[in-house]
Image: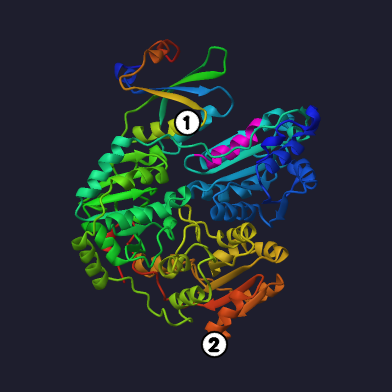
């Protein structure tokens, strides 16, 4: 993108500090918005950043917020996004957002300040072993020992975050490295995604043969399909071979939920007919999915009669949980492109009729879908007031599963949810990041009264930025999913899951100077919702939910998917 | 060391030689509560790279860990020796 300016003007070296050249490298990388919180050990970087005319800094109110703001940008664009924190508590506060990005394969570059190298290991003020802490939750991490090294490390951090299976990379920069002044006469190329190795053509041919011969195949899409930009190819494969298609939580939107071949989500809170169809399938084609326990239930009983084709860009995912009959390592988009011409067009009428029969007998029950004062009805009413261009973020808990079940997701990257780590507090800052990267769109964030409190300070960030983020707060004065599990599996011993003191969330919104809507008091909730969702700027929409409402069906933890209860 | 101990599987791993690499490698074992019985590490050639030998117990998780080790950015190559490696035999007298 700046290839013509690889050599400094007039061929003369520029004298730049480590901080200044890092800012320049981020500019060259195409970064235009980043989020963070300054502090002592990263102040040289912030000082250099203040001089940038290209990069807009969004001041978060907690470093975890900054991490999720970066996630919102990365999840909606597929590009690596940047978050910043100082040393010590700044860095530790970032860790949850980084771990979340690792489990959901989101490309992040986290830059942290560190105490000067001469003080590392002395228990200096705000010193923590950020490098050591981040080893298991990053794809890779760096402790930079010179300003010169930044010229290699920063582009490489972006390349690593984006290449293969995406993920977070952390760059820890000691203060003295930020202040070190060096001559820069030549700039490195910006880091970009490296092409994945070519997939094995023989295995693809075998996979095609298995698909062509299967009687009852099911296509099982995971988040890798979204990351690879392969949703269209996956839908084409499904249509060509008439494959009933299920999606993991991470893949929702890859195939429009109202597509005739869509089985919706599988697993713990999937539709009964979906899990039952998987019981009967003779071939499971897993694409960019990792056989997560919430999707498979008891692994030994998952798709008991099926041969397995597993396509994933990460070779370590193949055979990790389920041994695949054909395991294909490669970018799923590239694999599908090679697979498609070898797959016979077929109607597969018997199997699709059987699936339709299962669907008729055991559909997903969404009671109250027409009533905007009920949980499913509220989700539906929000969807009715918006079009498919809106982004849908969630926090974690019952509301997340209700939205996953009921919101008509129709495009990849529309859906922003913490799948792997299941981080309460994810929703609001991620929605802010989505809005920063897509200022022309509406972002709706469904949250719960437990989750919203975990990053509620980001309402201040939201108010300051004036973004088009609408928080739909489903309030049951409880940690609803914990409450549900205690009721169902712990002898109704409800403990530590009810909130006795209940904040007035509408007053909290007013305190942050954010518009609010009390849906409980609205005479016409549909009209009120439509107006609030389509007015510009932030808004908190509050709705009371009955704590007795549960997420059904539910597969008890550790049970086989066919042992689902409810629904 | 007993004969049995000396025939434990050994992973021979070539890595970039800089601080933190050992932590990345052994972290993959410790997070799985998978004990590493023996470790040898020496620089190779000019010291740009190092070679690590990890002596471990046979375990069904080993294949998955090898794949994870191969994914590490600073790991260049992993060789698996299922019937032990003589590197550990010579160290016996120091461990008495």
**Residue B25 percent coordinates (x, y):** 48, 30
- Main SS of the magenta part reads helix
How many angstroms separate mark 2 from mark 1 (CA)?
60 Å
Residue pushed farthest bottom?
A523
For image coordinates 33% across by 45% down, the residue present is: A339
The total number of labels drawn is 2
Chain ID, mark 1: B
**Residue A338 percent coordinates (x, y):** 35, 43
Which disc is residue A126 wearing?
A: none
For image coordinates 80% across by 46% down, the residue present is: A51
Q: Quadrant of residue A547?
A: bottom left
Left or right: A137 in relation to A328: right
Question: Where's the N terminus of chain A, which quadrant?
Answer: top right
Crowd rating for badge 2 (residues with CA inside 10 Å; few <14, some 14–19, many 20+): few
**Residue A472 percent coordinates (x, y):** 55, 72
For image coordinates 45% across by 68% down, the residue present is: A403
- Whether tag 2 and tag 1 are in contact, CB under 8 A, the answer is no
Left or right: A197 in relation to A426: left
Q: Secondary structure at mark 2?
A: loop
Q: Which residues are magenta?
A: A152-163
Which disc is residue B26 wearing?
A: 1
Which disc is residue A524 wearing?
A: 2
């Amino acid at each position: 993108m700046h290839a013509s300016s690889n050599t400094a003007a007039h061929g003369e070296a520029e004298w730049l500090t480590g901080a200044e050249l890092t800012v320049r490298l981020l500019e060259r990388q195409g970064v235009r918005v980043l989020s963070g919180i300054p502090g002592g050990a990263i102040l040289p970087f912030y000082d250099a950043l203040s001089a940038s005319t290209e990069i807009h800094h969004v001041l978060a109110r907690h470093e975890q917020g900054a991490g999720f703001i970066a996630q919102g940008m990365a999840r909606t664009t597929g590009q690596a996004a940047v978050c910043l924190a100082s040393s010590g508590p700044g860095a530790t506060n970032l860790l949850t957002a980084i771990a979340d990005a690792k489990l959901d394969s989101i490309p992040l570059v986290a830059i942290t300040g560190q105490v000067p190298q001469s003080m590392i290991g002395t228990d200096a003020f705000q010193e923590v072993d950020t490098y050591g802490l981040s080893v298991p939750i990053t794809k890779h991490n760096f402790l930079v020992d010179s300003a010169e090294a930044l010229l290699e490390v920063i582009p490489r951090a972006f390349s690593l975050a984006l290449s293969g299976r995406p993920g977070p990379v952390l760059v820890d920069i000691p203060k003295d490295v930020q202040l070190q002044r060096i001559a820069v006469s030549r700039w490195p190329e910006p880091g970009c995604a490296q092409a994945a190795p070519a997939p094995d053509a023989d295995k693809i041919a075998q996979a095609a043969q298995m698909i062509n011969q299967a009687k009852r195949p099911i296509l099982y899409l995971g988040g890798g399909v979204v990351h690879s930009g392969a949703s269209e190819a996956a839908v084409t494969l499904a249509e060509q071979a008439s494959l009933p298609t299920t999606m993991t939580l991470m893949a929702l939107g890859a195939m429009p939920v109202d597509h005739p071949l869509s089985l919706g989500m599988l697993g713990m809170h999937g539709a009964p007919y979906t899990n039952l169809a998987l019981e009967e399938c003779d071939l499971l084609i897993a694409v960019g999915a990792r056989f997560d326990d919430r999707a498979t239930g008891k692994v030994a009983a998952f798709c008991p009669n099926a041969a397995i084709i597993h396509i994933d860009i990460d070779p370590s995912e193949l055979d990790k949980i389920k041994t695949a009959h054909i395991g294909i390592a490669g970018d799923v988009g590239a694999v599908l492109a090679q697979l498609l011409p070898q797959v016979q067009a077929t109607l597969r009428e018997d199997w699709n009729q059987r699936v339709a029969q299962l669907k008729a007998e055991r559909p997903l029950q969404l009671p109250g879908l027409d009533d905007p004062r009920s949980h499913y009805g509220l989700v539906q009413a929000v969807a009715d007031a918006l079009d498919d261009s809106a982004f849908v973020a969630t926090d974690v808990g019952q509301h997340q599963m209700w939205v996953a079940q009921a919101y008509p997701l129709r495009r990849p990257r529309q859906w922003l949810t913490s799948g792997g780590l299941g981080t309460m507090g994810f929703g609001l800052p991620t929605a802010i990041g989505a809005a920063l990267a897509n200022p022309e769109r509406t972002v709706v964030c469904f949250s719960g009264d437990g989750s919203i409190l975990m990053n509620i300070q980001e309402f201040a960030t939201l108010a300051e930025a004036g973004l088009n983020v609408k928080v739909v707060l489903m309030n049951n004065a409880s940690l609803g999913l914990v409450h549900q599990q205690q009721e169902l599996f712990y002898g109704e011993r409800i403990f530590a899951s009810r909130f006795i003191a209940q904040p007035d969330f509408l007053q909290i919104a007013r305190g942050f100077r954010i518009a609010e809507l009390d849906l409980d008091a609205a005479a016409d909730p549909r009209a009120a919702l439509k107006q609030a969702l389509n007015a510009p700027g932030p808004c908190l929409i509050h709705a009371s939910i009955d704590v007795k409402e549960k997420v059904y069906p539910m597969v008890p933890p550790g049970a086989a998917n066919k042992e689902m209860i409810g629904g | 060391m007993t004969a049995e101990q000396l025939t434990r599987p050994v992973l021979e791993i070539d890595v970039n030689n800089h601080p933190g690499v050992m932590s990345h490698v052994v972290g993959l074992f410790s997070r799985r509560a998978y004990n590493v019985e023996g470790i040898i590490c020496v620089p190779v050639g000019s010291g740009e790279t190092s070679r690590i030998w990890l002596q471990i117990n046979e375990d069904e998780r080993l294949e998955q860990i090898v794949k994870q080790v191969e994914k590490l950015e600073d790991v260049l190559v992993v060789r698996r020796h299922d019937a032990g490696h003589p590197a550990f035999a010579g160290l016996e007298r120091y461990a008495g």
